[in-house]
Amino acid sequence: METLEISKYLLGGFLILVGIMHFLLPKFFMSIMPHYLPAHKTLVLLSGVVEISCGILLLFPNTQTIGAYAAVALFVAVFPANIEMSRQFYVKKKKGFWWTIIRLPFQIGLIYWALQFIK
């Protein structure tokens, strides 16, 4: 198995795991959602379904391209929640604020990673 294929399975597994976490820890994901979005719980559960779907689509050669495009769209769509998390850490003076700031550029890395699987 080549490195890129292993990487595809890692990203797919990561997406599936994080998607499942939306159902196990919905309050955490609701807490980082921007306040201007409605129906937080519904959107958290829906994004969990989307993440799981992206992960599954990536795993199979026939669907990996659509999975990669969907993952890129997902990573762009959830970026405001990552910014909101940083904002909340700053406003509440919570420990780990700098970790949330350092984490933001990694979203670009996730997008680049997903783009590798477009055929």
Image (spheres, rainbow, N blue to C red):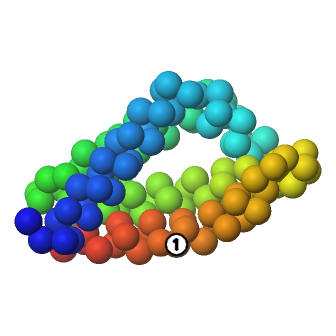
Tell me where residue 59 appears, x and y as whole percent. Answer: 19, 52
Quadrant containing the C terminus in the rendered view: bottom left
Using residue 31 as the reference point, say whether residue 4 is left or right of it. Answer: left
Q: Is residue 101 left or right of residue 76?
A: right
Which residue is rendered at x = 58% and y = 53% of the image?
78
Q: Image height check: is 56 above or below 61?
A: above
Whether residue 96 is visible here, answered yes or no, is yes
In the image, is 71 to the left or to the right of 45? left
Image point 78% across, 41% down: which residue? 35
Q: How many marks?
A: 1
Circle 1 crowding by C-alpha within 10 Å: few under 14, some 14–19, many from 20: some
Reply above or below: 42 against 88.
above
Amino acid type, callout 1: Ile
Which residue lies under the disc numbered 1? 108
Q: Residue at x 48, y 33 (%)?
A: 21
| Residue 73 in the image, given as x and y percentages of width and height | 45, 60
Examine the rendered structure and indicate whether residue 18 appears above or below residue 1: above
Above or below — where is 99 with respect to 39?
A: below
Viewer-side residue, 10 vs 42: 10
Q: Quadrant of residue 62?
A: bottom left
Residue 89 image position (x, y, % from top left): 82, 50
